[in-house]
Image (spheres, grey):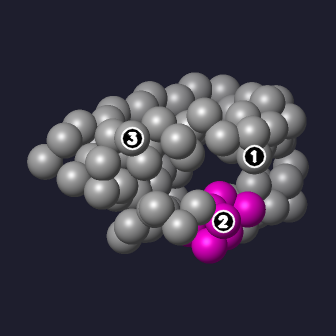
């Protein structure tokens, strides 16, 4: 099993309605990408580190499933057109377990 984790921070000048729209779109991903398992997302509620504002974690059965998702045209389009324009910082950790 592969766990793919992403934590991120929206740019400060991004309107709240845009933040909500991007987060809502992310939550549709499991229906669009059937190889995704156990999707979870939400705001960062840590009182120790507020560097990132949100995060998500998702599982894939195999590294091939993850790579197919990452390389898909629809994922690339989302990242290029919706994600990069509004994200200030991000960190990605992917590991096998």
Q: Which residue is mark 3?
A: 64
Q: Are marks 2 and 1 in contact (CB under 8 Å)?
A: yes
Q: Are marks 2 and 3 in contact (CB under 8 Å)?
A: no
Judging depth in this view, the residue of 49 and 63 nearest the camera is 63
Q: Is residue 27 visible?
A: no
Judging depth in this view, the residue of 18 and 37 nearest the camera is 37
| Residue 78 versus residue 51 in the image, above or below | below
Q: Position of residue 23 (x, y in %)?
A: 68, 60
Please indicate whether residue 9 sits to the left or right of residue 14 in the image. Answer: left
Q: Element at badge 2? A: helix
Q: Which residue is mark 2?
A: 32
Disc 2: CA contacts within 10 A as few (<14), some (14-19) or many (>=20): few
Q: How many marks?
A: 3
Gap between marks 2 and 1, in whole Å? 9 Å
In primary-sequence order, the first of circles 3 and 1 is 3
In primary-sequence order, the first of circles 2 and 3 is 2
| Magenta segment | 25-32
| Residue 11 versus residue 25 in the image, above or below | above
| Residue 48 versus residue 12 in the image, above or below | below
In the image, what residue occupies the spot 60% across and 34% down? 71
């Amino acid at each position: 099993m592969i766990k793919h984790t992403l934590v991120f921070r929206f740019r400060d000048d991004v309107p709240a309605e845009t933040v909500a729209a991007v987060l809502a779109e992310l939550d549709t991903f499991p229906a669009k990408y059937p190889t995704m398992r156990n999707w979870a997302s939400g705001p960062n509620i840590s009182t120790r580190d507020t560097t990132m504002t949100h995060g998500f974690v998702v599982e894939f059965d195999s590294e091939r499933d993850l790579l197919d998702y990452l390389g898909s045209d629809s994922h690339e389009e989302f990242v290029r057109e919706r994600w990069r324009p509004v994200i200030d910082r991000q960190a990605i950790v992917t590991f096998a377990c």
